[in-house]
Amino acid sequence: MLATLALLATPALAQQAGHQGMNHQGMDHSKMMQPTAANPYGPAEMDMHQKMMAAKGADAGETWIRKMIEHHRGAVAMSQIALRSSQNAEVRGEAQKAITSQNREIATLNAMLRKMGKPAQ
């Protein structure tokens, strides 16, 4: 019986220990985010992540809109990097389409904020 309880408790204990070890505040991500030829997106990803984490509103709906705007801006930034960095015509075409569609989404979300009487971002 004790062995069964120990086996049942192990995943929960491992999960708890994992969460304690997952505290990323104060960590230096700069080395992980150094752009390389194969992965030039690190700085744009970090910028998007920081801006999404900082985006707040007066309620859950406004906060969602503000976080999504930053998410879409991050997609634009990464797509612009792909345009500069890739020679693949298909990748470049999809990146350009992503820029267009993401900018459209940003405009829609900002219009929603204005309709709510909130400042656009």
Image (cartoon, rainbow, N blue to C red):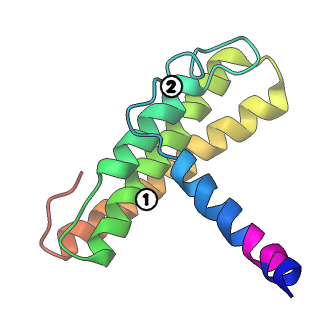
Q: Nearer the viewer, residue 91 or 33?
A: 33
**In the depicted structure, whether residue 64 falls above or below residue 116:** above
**In the depicted structure, whether residue 24 falls above or below residue 58:** above
Magenta stretch, residue numbers: 6-10
Foreground mark, 2 or 1? Answer: 2
Q: How far separated are the C-alphas under marks 2 and 1? A: 23 Å
**Disc 2 residue type?**
His
Residue 90 appears at what percent x and percent y? 83, 33
Residue 98 appears at what percent x and percent y? 62, 45
Quarter of the rendering containing residue 86: top right
Q: Residue at x 82, y 26 (%)?
A: 89
Look at the magenta stretch and give its main secondary structure.
helix
In primary-sequence order, the first of circles 2 and 1 is: 2
Q: Which numbered dot is residue 8?
A: none
Q: For the residue labelled by badge 1, is the local secondary structure a helix, a strand or a loop?
A: helix
Residue bearing the label numbered 2: 29
Residue 57 appears at what percent x and percent y? 22, 66
Q: Residue at x 46, y 59 (%)?
A: 105
Residue 46 colored in magenta in the image: no
Residue bearing the label numbered 1: 68
Residue 26 appears at what percent x and percent y? 38, 32
Q: For the residue labelled by badge 2, is the local secondary structure a helix, a strand or a loop?
A: loop
